[in-house]
Amino acid sequence: MSIKKSPLLILALINPEKSLDFTLQQWDLFVRQARRSGVLARFGYILESKELLTKVPVDALKHIQSAQTYATQFETSLTWEVRCIQKAFEKLDLPLIFLKGTAYAVADNIVSEGRVFSDVDILVPEEKLADVERALIYEGWKSAHLDAYDQRFYREWMHEIPPMQHVQRHTSIDVHHNVLPKTSRFCPNPEFLLANIIKVSDKNAWVLAPEDRVIHSATHLFHEGEFDHGFRDLSDLDLLLKEFDSLDDFWDKLLKRAEELKQQLPLYYALRYSSIILRTPIPENILNISKQWLPNTFQRHLMDWLYCRALMPNHSSCELYWTAFAKWMLYVRSHWIKMPVHLLVPHLCRKGWLQLTDQKDH
Amino acid sequence: MKSKSKEILLQIGPFSVLLESSLCAVIESVNNLYADFTILTKSPVLFTDFHIRIDRANFYRGYCRSQVQCYIDGKTPFKPLPLDQAFPFFEWGLNWVIASHVHYYLLVHAAVVEKDGHVLILCGKPGAGKSTLCAALSCHGWRLFSDEMAVIDLVTNEIIPCVRPVSLKNKAIDIISELSPGTVFGVSYKDTAKGTLSHMKPSKYSVENGDVRAFAKWVVFPQYKHGAATSLKELSKGQTVIELAKNSFNYNSLGIQGFNSLCDLVEGSHCYEFEYSDLNEAISLFDGLPV
């Protein structure tokens, strides 16, 4: 299947040169689609790498460069934050493993250019959680104000402890011991992840191996129930796959790891939708092998219908019929696969009640 | 009553802004307060910097609770407000888009006016009386630049006018109408987060010269204090840079560029702390400031 009438943002990411034919009115819409989806600065860096940025009309250019200015400052702050976390880890005899956005930045992946996010994510062995939490508290982080329910929700069921915030810098850190909730059927063995990490600087900075980084990105996106960053995350996968394509045996390792980590389904979706929506060049045989992971044709059609809506840029101009419904279905699905039903029903009831009564929910 | 959605495309300072709303109150207030502004027409050769939609919130909040929401490309950065605050919501929404997306100018939270080619920046905490001073000065021969933010060109260091209605709160509304009886005000909004709020229509002279930039000459930190004598104290340039940086929306994002720009601006300006209670005294003092 293919997307019939692609939004400008998708056209421009598939073929950046094409953006130079946009009228000013199209640039106007493009900037809003890209800004809303969180890829405006990224697009600026893509054009820059092709030496095309200066050909963009000045009205649109100033907005692109504005997003790049912000992203540059974000990168500086992130570098500082990483140093502060490294300092907190000095007393621990532990590798400091960064995940997601911070991992892309410390590993200097192309995908990190212009990528702005709110939390630093790290991975630690579950038995070291208490030590890590104590070390972070010692350096000025504290657990966000959560009630007893939330504390229990995180500590008993989730793959991370409650988010911690630094008291002076107000920066957030999520300390994970796995990449999926403990309650999920697809929860991988974290020891497999920890055994496949690589060091990326002479300081204490580690990341998951390239194939695991892709799988984690896929796992995250295809277990997600909210699609505010859905398109940005799909574009992350597109850029990661393009960058790692040149590594030795990358594609074979990717398939093998998906099986070892029980993440075949998310990887199948990642390969399928990045190739359908963003035309990511993925070897045909890899796509074919990944297809066997989906149980049946009905499910494939259903998921295509849902994800080709939910993963569009987050802008009204990119919505198809039933987009809101598709997002809602995937929201329900995300909870369904995260927790068994006897935990899920009371949890959702509580969330719904808090929303109805206008009480704060995290 | 829900009517058909209307669009108004305005040139507001250096920004082109498209307002979309199906609420008559919003359209009427814009027609009234932005009457002298350039209205642009949509065309394939026009780039619009910001799109803001003000409409009823979702079904439950919009119709059962009569609340209004500000949509910026589908994003809702604020909680819904009571329906009668729809027009101020547009003004707040516009402040938000500029402060969050414009990193190609240095933006400082301040009121700005100009006379004889010299700009006066009035910077201070909310409630310090900068909007009142700014409204009073703009009714007495000063040209309004903005009551909300100083927009500073990072290359030339000029201040760029961003003329909009001046938002006045509580007693300031009566004080300004008494001080300059000819001034046009919009609707009074009671019980907003800031108390009673009304917008003063900017003078035709300020609007028509909206593209004439100028350099800063004075940076003043005003403080209204009941019964206080008018007093102007010099402030060190270093302290002024620090205070302006604290009041900037995007100083942090601009790095060394922002620092250099602020230093240059302060270098060429007289810097003061100012305490007042009598507006007439304040006006004559500012008229006589050294150049």
Image: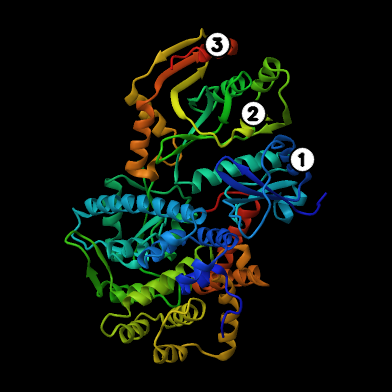
Disc 3 residue type? Ser
Q: Looking at the picture, how far across and down is residue A66, in whole percent?
A: 44, 51
What is the number of the mark on residue B208?
none
Q: Residue sitting at 27 percent across and 46 percent down?
A: A139
Q: Which residue is mark 1?
A: B28
Q: Secondary structure at mark 3?
A: helix
Task: Return the residue found at the far left.
Answer: A202
* Mark 1 neighbour density, 10 Å: few (under 14) some (14–19) many (20 or more): few
State the residue in front, A154 or A106.
A106
Labels 1 & 2 near each other (Cβ < 8 A): no
Whole-percent x, y for residue B1 in the image: 83, 49
- Mark 1 belongs to which subunit? B
* Residue at the image position 44 percent from the left and 33 percent from the top: B247
Q: Is residue A21 left or right of residue A53?
A: right
**What residue would you read off at disc 3?**
B284
The furthest residue to the right? B1
**Can you give x and y, in whole percent of width and height, for residue A179 in the image?**
38, 69
User: Do discs 1 and 2 belong to a common subunit?
Assistant: yes
Foreground residue, B278 or B161?
B161
Q: Which residue is mark 2?
A: B205
Image-quadrant location for residue A101: bottom left
Pick whichever of labels 2 and 3 is earlier in the sequence.
2
Q: Disc 1 versus disc 3: distance between alpha carbons?
A: 36 Å
Q: Is residue B194 visible?
A: no
Disc 1 marks a residue whose amino acid type is: Glu
Q: Earlier in the sequence, mark 1 or mark 3?
A: 1
Question: Which of B237/B204 is in front?
Answer: B204
Are tags 2 and 3 found on a single chain? yes
Q: CA distance from mark 2 to mark 3?
A: 21 Å
Chain for disc number 3: B
